[in-house]
Image (spheres, rainbow, N blue to C red):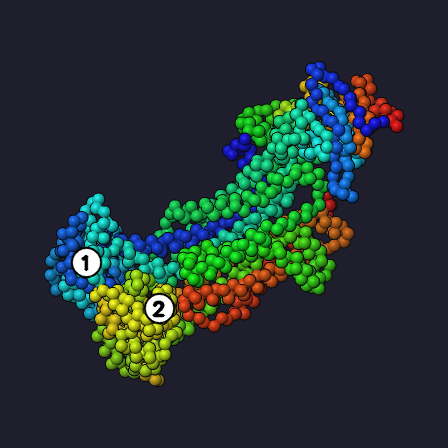
Amino acid sequence: MIRWHSTTLWKVAARQMLRRPARTALTLLGIVCGVATIVAVTLTTQATRRAFHEMFATVTGRAALEVVAEGLGGFDENLAAELANVHGVEAALPVIQTAAAALGKSGPTPVLILGIDPLRDGAARDYRMDTGRALQADDSASPSGALVLEVGFARAHGFEVGRPARLWTPTGIMELPVVGLMQPRGVATFNGGAVAIMPLATAQRAFALPKQVNSVQLVLVDGTDAPRVQAELQARLSTGLQVQAPSARGERSRDALYSIEQCLAAASLLTLVAGAFVILNTLLMNLTERRRQLAIWRALGATRAQVTGLLLREAALFGCAGTLLGIGAGHGLALVTLGVMEQVVGGVHFPELRWTSEALLLAVLFGPGMALAATWLPARRAARRAPLEDLLARGGVYRDEQRRWPAVVGAGLVAAQVVGLVGLAQGWVPPTMLALIMPLGVIGVVFLIPLAIPSLLRLVAVALRWMLGFEGRLAMRQLERRPTRTSLTVGTLAIAIFISIGVGNGLNGSVRDIRDWINRVATADFYVRASQPDGAYAITMSALPEKFEAELARLDGVARVDKVNWILARAHEQRVIVLACTMPAEGPLSVDLVEGHPEQVRRGFMQGGAVVGTALAQRLKLRVGDEIVLETRRGPTPLRIVGTANEYTIDGMALYLEWHAARQHLPVEGVHVFGVSAQEGKTAVVAEELARLSRERGLLLQSQGELRRYIDQSVLAVFGMVWGILGMIFVVASLGTVNTLTMNVLEQTRELGMLRAIGLQRRQLRKLIMAQALAVGLMSLVPGTLIGLALAYVIHVFSSILLAHAWPFHLDLALIAGCLAAALAITLLAALAPARRAARLQVVQALQVE
Amino acid sequence: MTGTMAHQATAGNGAFVIEVEGLQKSFGAGDNRVAALRGVSFRVARGEFVAIMGPSGSGKSTLLHLIGGLDTPTAGSVRISGQDVGAFTDDQLTLLRRRQIGFVFQAFNLLDVLTAEENVALPLILDGVAEGEAQRRAAAAVELVGLAGRRRHFPRELSGGEQQRLAIARALVTEPLLLLADEPTGNLDSATSAQIMSVLRDLVDRRGQTILMVTHDARHAALANRLLRLRDGQLAEEQHLAPASRSPSRVLEDLETLP
């Protein structure tokens, strides 16, 4: 029995890899690209989820549970005292936890406010001071209040102990003396230090919550079963209050980032698939080259299992080496991706990347796993060859054997993908399966491409003969002799093309639709706010006082001032965002209406009806005229649906309520953003007035154009990430093409030597190799374009279903042309080195090669 | 002359290493069917050096491949040490080649990713012998063929004669029952060929190795104990070569007298 630790056999595997350093390097790169993208996407996704999860867990310190109201509004502070007597509760701490904007030297900056009882808060949180002092009991009674900041945040924004800090709150600008700066530990690490601690009484004044809190945080007795206490408390609490783990606030982020994560995961899996085909192609080339060598092994007494084991060793080495390099590359890529995500989400500081067992496991699984999976079947087939045939072979070129099973498997995979997509659309299959379903069809298509190769070869042969004459004809011969290798190379290139066309067209369509949506909903000329909200609406939703509306309305040239608040709520056990807003009595609605007549919608809206995002309506299977049940402080409240609208906030899980109607059901505290519309011809005047006001008061001012550009940048940043990963697929495809062309040159060495001997010039030889590359590129264009167009349509239909609104299908011809040109360019570039190698062949030596 | 002639050869202990009975091998089917062997029978005793000669297409190499378990007969039987290898599974044939048969090929067939010593040790490694023990035995085999100073070289760094000596060392390292040599001097010049033949003869004389060798060269055939001549897939002639008659010219004379 073979010993797996036999050093001789591992040496054979390693030396075999080193015999063809260029081919080994190119193949390794294919694995590295695949592993790096998987690792990068996994690390980034984990980091972003962890960021939100840990942020809120950090804030609550040792508190295992918290009680909050629907919409995170205020409730009676005495509840804390009641809950302190519950069995298992060690301490019940009254807290106001909300957002505000600190006015530092660089302008308004979002900050988390914690209003605490200094006497009791130590049960949950520790405050280690760097400078000054922590909050004391006296501070609660002091009319001037007190503020403690994190030292790094304070220094960055110009805050010092002994000097007042100004904050925008729903009641106006509050000036509080800074009494201490915290070390960056525990609660002070929230969102990179953007946290401010004040006495509870101060917070109650600032945030218009007299005798109220918006969170009671519960520290449990050691060993207490938290879920049991949670269930017990929930049963005791009145309607409109709920008990949750503190980290549940971070769950909102998952909704905001979910579609991005799915997109990235699918793109990275596709890169991995492309990498797997490069490995498979390389392996098949190696096996062809080594038939005689493997026959010698068999003649000497190696069993089939031993030969298979030898080849699997090589695959394992490839995989391990690729994984090690891929882990390093993936970490670097993750840093870039995380930076982009920070920009996309906005206002959130993500912690450093942390390697988890899951990320390592994926790297190990996909690196060596992919290599072994691609190797296993070809290795078994190679080991089962009768050794005599290969021992007696006298050089020349082996002809590929064509088998039927790949086409059968390919058809099966494509069918499985179609079923999966239908299941996703119908809701039988959870959306989390999307990333796994997408690669099935891709793999299936590559397996089906061999069926099309004969026709493609004939088609391209005609074109090449016409373009390149004799060299074109010769070029086709090698490709015809190697249908399997040609198929895999064409297939990998075709993957790059059709993914780029299909996904790219889909992305461009989404960008266009988002821009259209913004154009329809962002109707004000200017937007005034305390700070930019984060993409999850979970952290940095600071508010301005509502009375500011009158001041804005009095500015010269202002026609109208509207208000919008984003409130975290629940409906039908679904997390939703409620946009409480005002709407003009006439003129265009500031929603992208899909269902409902505009005037009827306006009337119904003003009467307290809801305009629901189409995706939410579809998820809940509701239509205009139905009722959506919103969880409010008073319990479940049905609201009539007066219209549905295209909505991109949190992937459409949103509904619009009229401002005053929303206030009846949910906490509407301050104003998150004022929309200021100018009178005709007075835009410049209003701009000047608002700029002055913003400078004086420390406000964030954006024109309509600036808002659109800001959203555009975030959207393009996400899509840029996806395009970056799709670009990797092109890189991987080009590696496969270089490998194939180099191998073709090697195999044809004697033949090319003969051609040179009878008078073929070097430049003609180079032309021959370039012709092969061109042929491969042209062959990939046909399936790549056709499947790409089909994929573009499928993605369009699928997106329309998911978002529950349709937009016109548009083929981006520039994109298609660009993808095809890129594919051809990459193929021709990939041919340069092999062509040079062929041209340098020494004739005599080439003729002696077997 | 009949197509088959059985010859009873005796060895010191009466054991036959090879027993071939009515061996047939055909390739292709229907109109394309070609009979490479048409019923060959003979026996080889332990310690014999048997040469096989014949024109191209006479079935020499096919016969060797069948005996060596690289191919399976269409009809007839091959017994190695009394075992009928025709009924062996692929794994059994593989083990036969690994443990009981040593191959020496015309094209050397060394693995160029392994050093000389590693090439020789390979059959032992495949058999699960511990690395240290395999290395020791390989070193001994390399020394036996006079290549101790070249054991760390790769095949591409060795001359043709050295490579073939290395191949012989690899064939011997498992102390096989039988050594099969398929035109071992076919790719070598005359001086080197003489060296190789000397090595083979030495193995028979000093170690009692049983050797079956296919050759085109009468001078090399003359060094064997017995000569089998094939023609058109049949055994045309069998000839004992006494020591005095082991000269190439005598072999040629004998060959010319055959009908």
Element assignment for label 1: loop
Q: Residues within 10 Å of mark 2 (few under 14, many from 20)?
A: some
Q: Say whether residue A374 is visible.
A: yes
Residue A504 in view, yes or no: no
Which residue matches tag 1?
Answer: A237
Position above or below: A180 against A105: above
- Tag in front: 2 or 1: 2
Badge 2 marks a residue whose secondary structure is loop
Residue under circle 2?
Answer: A622
Check the residue under mark 2 and report the chain it is in.
A
Q: Position of residue A439 (x, y in %)?
A: 50, 55
Quarter of the image with the C terminus of chain A in it: top right
Amino acid tagged 1: Leu
Q: Is residue A274 left or right of residue A285?
A: left
User: Which three-letter amino acid code belongs to the residue tagged 2?
Assistant: Leu
- What whole-number distance in Å separates the C-alpha atoms at marks 2 and 1? 30 Å
| Sequence-first disc among 2 and 1 | 1
Please indicate whether residue B83 sits to the left or right of residue A113 in the image.
right
